[in-house]
Structure formats: structure tokens, C-alpha cells
Amino acid sequence: MPTSTTGSSSNHSRSVAAALPVDRSGFTLMELVVVMVLLSLLTAFAAPRIRTSLFTDQLKASGRRLVGLISETGQEARRSHQPWEIVYNPDERSFHATPGGDNGDTGTGNTSIRPVSLPEGVRVVDITTARSGAKKEGELVLRFTSRGYVDQTLIHLADDSGRNMTLAISPFLGSIRMYDTYLDMDQERAQWQ
């Protein structure tokens, strides 16, 4: 006659489970809630400061917009196979990209490249090129060849709090580096060595 072991087996597993020690080293719901509240408070206090430093730093934002304008103008010169210029107008406090070149042809001036205007607290200190040195006054011009090449150029920006920024444009590599200080040509060249 067959015997059923189901009842005795389940009793045996319950007695083994009762004999094993229970590990209670996990976190309680209350502890998890407290940690979540503390993290929320820290985030609430830190987020405005992070947002302020990332989005309201007018000097860095202006530098990034100017890097975009320079890159886009170099690409447009290569695409159209004609020289282009970026002209800084100190009266308007803005950089404009226009077709034009050494032959006096300034093109139509109709371009899809948006100008970059500087905010009130940011100013151009000077534009330094390898050929002509530093120029601080009047219209400042950055010329691109029909192949998109430009002289080695440093654009120096500053803000009202006394911070400086240097945009270093490499003539053939098409790279633009941003430095959080005022660098002259010799210092910028040393950065690459």
C-alpha cells in the first residue's frame, strides 16, 4: 500500500525553516524614507546653484556661441568655395558672418548664419592674429579663405567681474579651444607642446 509523504515532508520543511536564523540586516521602510527625504532636500538646495552656474555664466555662454559661429562660418566657406568674414561691430556689440574677401566683393550679406550678440556684462578685449598682432578698436575682422582656413587667431573676451577667456583658433585643424584666462600667442603655442 502506497504511503503519502506529503504531510510529513511539509512539516519537516517548516521545522527546518524555523531552525534557520533569520537575517534582519536589511533596511526598514522608515530608514529608506528618511534617506529619500534627505536626498530630496540636498537636491532641492543644490539644483538652483548648479543651474545658475551652468546657464547664467554669460562669459562662457558667449564663448560657446562664438565658437559655433566660427565653426559654421568655416564650414560655409568650404561649402561655397568663397572667402567669408566674421566682423565684430563694437557699436552693435555683435559678430556677423558675411561672404566676402580680399577682392572687395562683400557678397549679398544674405546668410543663414545667425549673428552672435554679446550680453551687457561681456566685452571683446582684442582679437590677435599671427599676421597683424592685436587689434582692440574699430571693426575687428576674422577672414576665412575659400577652403575654410583662417589665420591663427586669439579672441579675448572679458566680463565685468574681471574674468577673462581666450578662444584660440587653429588655422588648419579647424579646432577652437577655450581657455579661462588671457593667453598671448606664445603662451597658446606652449599649450600645444
Image: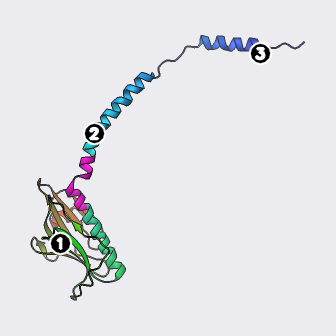
Q: CA distance from mark 3 to mark 2?
A: 61 Å
- Name the residue type under label 3: Thr
Residue 144 lies within the magenta run: no
Image coords of residue 107 (percent x, y): 26, 85
- Name the residue type under label 1: Tyr
Q: CA distance from mark 3 to mark 1?
A: 90 Å
Residue at the far left: name it: 137
- Name the residue type under label 2: Ala
Q: Image check: 2 left or right of 117?
A: right
The structure residue drawn at horizontal position 77% and vertical position 15%, both measured from the top left corner, is 6
Image coords of residue 96 (percent x, y): 23, 73
Determine which residue is flagged by label 2.
46
Determine which residue is flagged by label 3.
6
Mark positioned earlier in the residue sequence (3 or 2): 3
Quarter of the figure with residue 64: bottom left
Quarter of the figure with residue 93: bottom left
Q: Secondary structure at mark 2?
A: helix
Q: Which residues are magenta?
A: 51-63
Tell me whether circle 3 and circle 2 mark residues in contact (CB < 8 Å).
Answer: no
Tell me the colour scheme of the image: rainbow
Quarter of the figure with residue 128: bottom left
